[in-house]
Each structure stands twice: as C-alpha cells, then as structure tokens.
Image (spheres, rainbow, N blue to C red):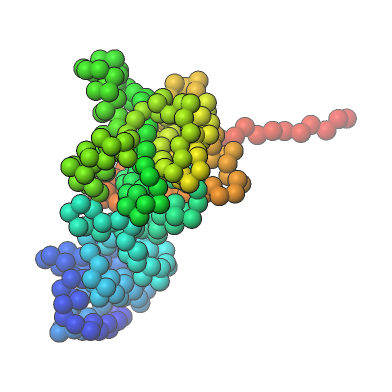
C-alpha cells in the first residue's frame, strides 16, 4: 500500500473540501478505491500506488477550489473526479475564474466545466455562436446570462429570445387560449432563465418597454435586428429554410447564439434539421463559432449524465455498419 500526504493552509479549507458529513471525500474514496484520513491540516491518502496518486490529485484540486472560496457541490466533485481520471486535473484551476452574470438574488453565474468555459468565450469573441450538446449542459442558461450581461453593459439595446414551436408528441391546437397562450409553454425555459437573472418585476418592465422580446421563430420573418442579442433555442427543430431565414435577420451591432441538441429532433422524418445543416455549412465561416458540449458538461442531476451516456452508447451500437464495397477485377 502506498501513502500520499497533503497539507492544507487552514482547517476551514478542509471543512469546505470534505463537505457535509464528508460526502465529497467519500465520493473520491469510492472513485479511486482509497482511504482518506485527516489529522489537523494534514491529509493522508492510502491505496495502491496509482490510486493513491489519483486520490491525492483529486483532494489537492478540491482543496485549491476551497481556498478560492468556490462553491463545491456534488456536480463539481463528479466533474473533478472525471478530470483527474483523464489526467486533466491541472485545468481545474481555470474553473470559476470569471463571473458571467449575477442573478437577481445576487448569485454569481460561472462556468462549471471546461466545455462551458469554451462556450462562454466563444459567445464573447464571435458574432454568431452555435452551441450543440445534450440536455443539462447549460446551453440556454449561459446564453441568457451573456445576453443579460451585454444588456446591462449597454452593448445591446434589446434581448430577443426565440424558439420554433414544434410539438414533441403533443398537439399545439389542443392547448387553451389564444396564440400567445398556446406558444408560451414552448418559451417557458427562456422565461425561467430571464426571471432568475433579472427578477420577475424587472423582466415585466423591460418586456413592456420592448427591451426584451420572447417570441416564436415565425415572428422573426421579414425583420432586421440591429443592436440586439438574439438567442435561438431548440434549434434542432428548425427546418433548413427557417434556419437560413433566422441567420439572415442579423443586423449591425447584434450578436446571435444558437443552441440545440441534435439527438432530440422532433421534426417529421422527411425534414432536414436546420441545425445539423448549419453546422456543416457554416463550419469554416469567419466570426462563427461552433461549440460542442458533451455528457461530461452536464450539470444537472448525476443521473442525467448517466442517461445521456447510456443513450449515446446505445445509439452507437444501433447504427448499421457501412456496407462493404467490393472491387472486381476484369479477367
């Protein structure tokens, strides 16, 4: 058995790193099959040579996050374990450096994974950003946070949020109320993010003044959107015609973020996803960034990450093998 010794500067750092009822260290012990003991500010990690090394790396990264007063939750510990397993623990220090936005309740919004960090930087440095990834990777939430920041800093005059009103197995016509009442359920995730960033009262005020607009994609046709931060959510459900129409709404001083999950397309089988086509068509166009998030960037419940990974694995196994082509020599 091998031992690794770590020392923390203050006992408070260890209290934060260990978590309630030592839940964080228990996850690290289970992940790397090690035993972690503490005496004062000294940590001892015991296990096989390799496991003790990895366990020490994980605890060191955890203590460094605690020293920076970073919030440490289950998701962050899971992500840290994943990074250490991949040999990328040195990059963990880059997390939490920049605050994207502060919510109405004073909570800072930060990137929780390196993939999210790349996504945020892509939005900041490009006129058009396409963010693609599975559910729970923060695509919409972080895009709204960037939009609110740009609006508060007066870089844009308006925030425009839109998404296609495509049914995921339900029927739009059966919903009660007028057209706005019918499309509101489709726009609810966008409303929720704005409520959290701005507060319900501020959101209502800005919406009444026309500074914030949340509308179905069909309402974008024929418009030129200047000095605006425009977000197209659930873009996998756009047709190629809708995507082209949306992209050509871009005006001077505006920024566009397009988000979607290519594995959750609700279009009829004979329709091509505008998101998939846009990724292929715009891949090499200057000032357009295509940012791909993965299952490791999921920041929801741990089970969501497992579900995404299970579906990815199943779909890879279910794909038909390409047919072999044979060349025949003429005699």
Please indicate, yes or no, whether residue 101 appears anywhere in the rendered image.
Answer: yes
Residue 225 on image: x %, y %? 45, 37
What residue is at 59 percent from the left and 34 percent from the top? 322
Residue at image coords 40%, 26%:
219
Q: Nearer the viewer, residue 272 or 210?
A: 210
What is the x, y in percent for residue 58? 31, 70
- The x and y percentages for residue 139 are 37, 46
Q: Residue at x 59, y 38 (%)?
A: 281
* Quarter of the image that includes the N terminus: bottom left
Residue positioned most to the right: 331
Q: 26 above or below 233?
A: below
- For the residue pair 133 and 118, the one nearer the viewer reads as 118
Q: Is residue 162 left or right of residue 43?
A: right
Say if 205 sits above or below 64 in the image.
above
Residue 161: quarter of image:
top left
On screen, residue 73 versus residue 157, left or right, reads left
Q: Quadrant of residue 2?
A: bottom left
Q: Residue 71, how many percent across, how many down?
A: 22, 64
């Amino acid at each position: 058995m091998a031992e690794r010794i770590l020392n923390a500067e203050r006992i408070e750092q260890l209290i934060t790193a260990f978590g309630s009822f030592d839940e964080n260290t228990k996850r690290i012990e289970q992940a790397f099959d090690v035993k972690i003991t503490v005496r004062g500010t000294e940590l001892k990690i015991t296990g096989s040579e390799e496991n003790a090394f990895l366990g020490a790396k994980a605890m060191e990264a955890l203590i460094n996050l605690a020293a920076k007063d970073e919030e440490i939750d289950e998701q962050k510990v899971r992500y840290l374990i994943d990074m250490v397993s991949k040999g990328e623990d040195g990059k963990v220090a880059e997390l939490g450096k920049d605050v994207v936005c502060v919510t109405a309740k004073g909570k800072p919004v930060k990137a929780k994974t390196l993939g999210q960090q790349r996504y945020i930087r892509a939005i900041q440095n490009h006129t058009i950003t396409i963010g693609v990834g599975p559910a729970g990777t923060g695509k919409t939430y972080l895009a709204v946070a960037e939009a609110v920041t740009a609006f508060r800093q007066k870089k844009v005059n308006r925030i425009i949020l839109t998404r296609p009103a495509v049914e995921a197995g339900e029927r739009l016509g059966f919903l009660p109320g007028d057209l706005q009442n019918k499309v509101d359920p489709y726009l609810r995730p966008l409303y929720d993010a704005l409520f959290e960033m701005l507060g319900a009262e501020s959101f209502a005020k800005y919406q009444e003044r026309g500074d914030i607009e949340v509308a179905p994609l069909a309402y974008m046709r024929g418009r030129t959107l200047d000095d605006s931060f425009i977000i197209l959510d659930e873009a996998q459900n756009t047709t190629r015609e809708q995507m082209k129409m949306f992209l050509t709404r871009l005006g001077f001083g505006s920024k566009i973020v397009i988000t979607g999950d290519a594995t959750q397309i609700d279009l009829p089988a004979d329709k091509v996803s505008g998101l998939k086509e846009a990724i292929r068509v715009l891949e090499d166009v200057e000032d357009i960034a295509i940012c791909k998030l993965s299952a490791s960037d999921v920041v929801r419940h741990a089970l969501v990450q497992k579900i995404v990974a299970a579906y990815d694995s199943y779909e890879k196994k279910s794909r038909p093998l390409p047919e072999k082509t044979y060349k025949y020599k003429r005699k």
